[in-house]
Image (cartoon, helix red, strand yellow):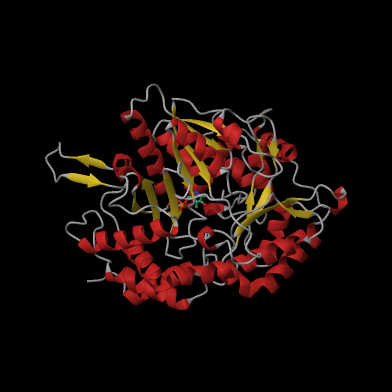
Amino acid sequence: MFQRPPAEILAELEALRAHDAPTHGGHVLSYVYDPGLVEIDELAAAAMRAVQSVNGLDPTTFPSVAAMERDIVAFVRGMLHGQAGGGQRPDDTVVGSVTSGGTESCLLAVKTARDAWRAAGGEGAPMLVAPSTVHAAFHKAAAAFELELVVVPVDQMTGRPAPEDVIAHLSDRVALVVLSAPSYPFAVLDPVEAVAAECAARGIALHVDACIGGFALPWWQGSGDGGRALPPWDFSVPGVTSISADVHKYGYAPKGVSVLLQRGRDRQRHQYFALSDWPGYPVVNPTLLGSKSAGALAAAWAIIQALGDDGYASLVAKAHRATDALVTLVSGIEGLRVFGDPTGPLFAVCTDESVSPDRRVDPHHWADRVKQAGWLIQAQPGLVQRDGTRLPHTTHLTVTPVTERVLEPLGQALGSAADAVRGIPAVDPAAVLAALTGSLGTTGLPERLDSETAWGLLERLGVGAGGAMPAEMAPLLALIEAVPSSVAERLLVELVARLVEP
Ligand SMILES: *Cc1c(COP(=O)(O)O)cnc(C)c1O
C-alpha cells in the first residue's frame, strides 16, 4: 500500500528538520516562543492529534470547535478587560474569533472596519492611518481591501508616534486607525489613550495590534522591573474598537492561532462572509479560510486550560527578568545602545553614535557575528520616513521565558561578537549597489527586474543554489536600504520563490 515505509519517510523528515534553526532552548531570538516547559509541548501535540481529522469550517457539525473557540475568546476577553455580553449596552459587548495567525487577525480587523465604515455611509476611498512602525500585515491589508494607507512618521529617537500627528490625519474618510501594543520593530507601546479619546469623539474605529504583546503585557506590570505602571491600552480604554493577540506567540501555542476581539456585536458581524446565493452549501465564514485545521485551536485551548492566569503570569515574569537582564547587558556594551524605551519582552539595538567611530558597533555586523556563535538575532533595515527623518538600522531580540536559563552564554556571545566587530563601519550601501549595477553593465538598476536579472543580482550577493543564504546578512540588508523599495521587494520575492522551485 505504501510506496515507501513510514519509518523511512519519518527518518527523512527528521533529517530535514536537523537543518532547521532550533525551536527550543533559547538560541533563536525571533519567530519561536519557548516557555521552557516540555509538558506544554506534549499537551499541545496530544490536543492537535485529537482533532486531526476535524474540519474547523463548520462548528455546527463539529461543535467541539465552537466550544474551544468560546473558551479561548472568553479567556482573552478577560485578559484584555473586555465587557461580556448580557445586561450591558450591546455595543460594548466584546466578542471575537480565533484566526490562523496575527496576519489574518490584522486583515480581518481592517476588513471589518472598512465594511462598518461603508455601512455607516462612508464615501470615497476609505483610509487607514497608522505609524510607520505598524506591522507589515497592515500594509498587506490596506492593499488587499483597497484602503489608502497613511503612514505617520514616528520620533526618530523614541520610535513613538506623537498622538497629535496621528490625530491630524483623522477625517470622515478614515475607516480605521491602528496603534501597536507594542510595535514589533522597537517594542514601543503607542499612545493608545490619547488617540482613542479623539477617535471615540469622532466615531472612528481604533485597532490595537497586540499580536506580540497581547499575551505578555497583561502580566508585565508587577513582574520584573519593580512594577513600572503601564498606561492603559486594552478594552479598558473606551475608544478601542478591536484588538489582535497571537496565541502562537506569548500564548505558547504552535503556529496557526491568534485571536481578534471586537467591541460591539453588530460591528463584528462585518467581519463575516456569508453566501446563500450559489447552488452549494450555504457558506458562513468568520475568517478568511474555508475548510481549516482545528489543530492549533485545540492546542491553544489545551495550553490556556493548563496555564491559566497564574501560569501566564509566572512565564511573563521569567521573560521580563530575562529582558531586563539583556537590556542592561546590551546597554553596557560599548558602541551599542537599546533603541528608545521598549515595553514588553522584546527590544531593538542600534549603534551608539555618542562614542567615536572606532568604538561603534554596527548592529548588522554584530548580528552576523552572533550567528557564527550559534545564536540568531534579527537584523532590521533602517527607514527614511515620509518627512525625511531616518530610523536607524537595528537588530531585534525577542525574549522568551527560556532565555532566562541561557543568559550567561548568550550574554557572553553578545559581548564577544561586539568586541569582534567594534570599529568596523556599517556596510556602505552605495558600494554594494555599485558592485551590483556594475554587473549589469549599466549605470543603474532597471525599473522592473525579471526573474533572471533578479537572481543574477542575488547570486552576486552570495546567495547560493537553492537559496542558501550568504554567510553575512549585512550586505543584503545594506542593499535593501540602498535601492528603491520596489526593487528590494522584487529581489526578496525572487529569493524566497527560488527556495521552493523544484
Ligand atoms: C507577529 C506580529 C503580527 C503578525 O503576525 P503573524 O502571526 O506573524 O502573522 C502583527 N503585528 C505584530 C505587532 C506582530 O508582532
Image quadrant where residue 194 sits: top right
Q: Which residue in the rendered view is the most extreme toward the top?
A: 124
Instruction: From this view, report whether residue 399 is shown above or below residue 147.
Output: below
x and y, in percent, of residue 352 in the image: 79, 50
Instruction: From this view, report whether residue 89 is shown above or below residue 443.
Output: below
Front position in the image: 393 or 240: 240
Image quadrant where residue 486 sits: top right
Q: Which residue in the rendered view is the most extreme toward the left?
A: 279
Q: Is residue 476 left or right of residue 352?
A: left
Q: Is residue 144 left or right of residue 227?
A: left
Q: Is residue 261 left or right of residue 334?
A: left
x and y, in percent, of residue 237 in the image: 48, 46
x and y, in percent, of residue 388 in the image: 69, 30
Instruction: State which quarter of the image contains the N terminus.
Output: bottom left
Whether residue 140 can be seen here = yes
x and y, in percent, of residue 312 in the image: 48, 68
Front position in the image: 84 or 246: 84
Residue at 68% from the left image edge and 49% from the top image edge: 394
Instruction: From this view, report whether residue 305 is shown above or below residue 181.
Output: below
